[in-house]
Amino acid sequence: MFARSAFRASTATSAVARRGFHSTGVRMASPYHYPEGPRSNIPFNPMTKYFYVRYWGYMATGFGLPFAIAS
Protein backbone atom coordinates (compact mmCIF):
# COMPACT_ATOMS: atom_id res chain seq x y z
CA MET A 1 0.00 0.00 0.00
CA PHE A 2 2.75 2.43 0.89
CA ALA A 3 4.82 1.41 -2.10
CA ARG A 4 1.93 2.15 -4.46
CA SER A 5 1.39 5.66 -3.05
CA ALA A 6 5.14 6.32 -3.12
CA PHE A 7 5.22 5.24 -6.77
CA ARG A 8 2.32 7.59 -7.60
CA ALA A 9 4.03 10.48 -5.81
CA SER A 10 7.31 9.94 -7.67
CA THR A 11 5.61 9.73 -11.09
CA ALA A 12 3.58 12.86 -10.42
CA THR A 13 6.66 14.95 -9.66
CA SER A 14 8.51 13.60 -12.69
CA ALA A 15 5.54 14.47 -14.94
CA VAL A 16 5.57 18.04 -13.65
CA ALA A 17 9.32 18.34 -14.06
CA ARG A 18 9.10 16.92 -17.58
CA ARG A 19 6.45 19.43 -18.69
CA GLY A 20 8.90 22.07 -19.90
CA PHE A 21 6.56 24.97 -20.78
CA HIS A 22 7.47 24.77 -24.44
CA SER A 23 4.03 25.87 -25.65
CA THR A 24 3.80 29.11 -23.65
CA GLY A 25 5.26 31.24 -26.43
CA VAL A 26 2.88 29.85 -29.00
CA ARG A 27 -0.14 30.43 -26.78
CA MET A 28 0.86 34.03 -26.08
CA ALA A 29 1.23 34.71 -29.79
CA SER A 30 -2.33 33.57 -30.44
CA PRO A 31 -4.75 36.17 -31.85
CA TYR A 32 -7.23 35.11 -29.15
CA HIS A 33 -4.99 36.19 -26.27
CA TYR A 34 -6.25 39.47 -24.90
CA PRO A 35 -4.02 42.06 -23.21
CA GLU A 36 -3.46 41.68 -19.51
CA GLY A 37 -3.15 44.16 -16.72
CA PRO A 38 -5.29 46.59 -14.79
CA ARG A 39 -8.35 48.04 -16.56
CA SER A 40 -7.83 45.86 -19.66
CA ASN A 41 -10.55 43.31 -18.87
CA ILE A 42 -13.52 45.62 -18.31
CA PRO A 43 -15.94 46.79 -21.01
CA PHE A 44 -15.59 50.51 -20.22
CA ASN A 45 -12.80 53.02 -19.84
CA PRO A 46 -12.52 54.45 -16.31
CA MET A 47 -9.82 56.87 -17.41
CA THR A 48 -12.16 59.21 -19.30
CA LYS A 49 -12.89 62.67 -17.97
CA TYR A 50 -16.56 62.18 -17.04
CA PHE A 51 -16.43 58.51 -16.02
CA TYR A 52 -17.27 59.13 -12.36
CA VAL A 53 -20.28 61.31 -13.21
CA ARG A 54 -21.64 58.65 -15.55
CA TYR A 55 -20.81 55.87 -13.08
CA TRP A 56 -22.61 57.46 -10.13
CA GLY A 57 -25.51 58.50 -12.37
CA TYR A 58 -25.88 54.91 -13.50
CA MET A 59 -25.67 53.63 -9.92
CA ALA A 60 -28.21 56.19 -8.64
CA THR A 61 -30.61 55.33 -11.45
CA GLY A 62 -30.25 51.60 -10.85
CA PHE A 63 -30.81 51.99 -7.13
CA GLY A 64 -33.57 54.61 -7.30
CA LEU A 65 -35.61 53.25 -10.19
CA PRO A 66 -37.26 50.39 -8.25
CA PHE A 67 -38.29 52.82 -5.50
CA ALA A 68 -39.63 55.30 -8.05
CA ILE A 69 -41.62 52.57 -9.80
CA ALA A 70 -43.01 51.23 -6.51
CA SER A 71 -44.26 54.61 -5.29
Image (cartoon, helix red, strand yellow):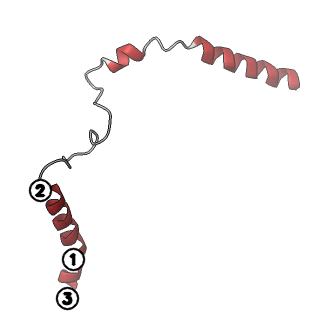
Q: Nearer the viewer, mark 3 or mark 2?
A: 2
Badge 1: residue crowd in 10 Å (few <14, some 14–19, many ≥20): few
Q: Is residue 26 above or below residue 64?
A: above
Q: Which residue is mark 3?
A: 71
x and y percent of residue 31 in the render? 25, 22
Which circle marks residue 42 in the picture? none
Q: CB atoms at circles 1 and 2 under 8 Å apart? A: no
Secondary structure at badge 1 equals helix
Q: Residue at x 26, y 45 (%)?
A: 42
Q: Residue at x 19, y 88 (%)?
A: 71
> Label 1 amino acid?
Gly
Q: Which residue is mark 1?
A: 64
In the displayed structure, does residue 68 sit left or right of residue 37?
left
> Label 2 amino acid?
Tyr
Residue nearest the observer in this picture, 39 or 6: 39
Secondary structure at badge 3 equals loop
Q: Residue at x 67, y 14 (%)?
A: 14
Mark 1 or 3 closer to N-term?
Answer: 1
Residue nearest the observer in this picture, 51 or 16: 51
x and y percent of residue 19 in the render? 56, 14
> Label 3 amino acid?
Ser
Mark 1 or 2 closer to N-term?
Answer: 2
Q: CB atoms at circles 3 and 2 under 8 Å apart? A: no
Q: Count all numbered tags in the image, as a single digit.
A: 3
Residue nearest the observer in this picture, 11 or 57: 57
Secondary structure at badge 2 equals loop
Q: Which residue is mark 2?
A: 50
- Which residue in the rendered view is the most extreme toward the front? 49
Mark 3 or 2 closer to N-term?
Answer: 2
| CA separation in Å, label 1 and label 2 | 21 Å
x and y percent of residue 6 in the render? 81, 22
| CA separation in Å, label 1 and label 3 | 11 Å
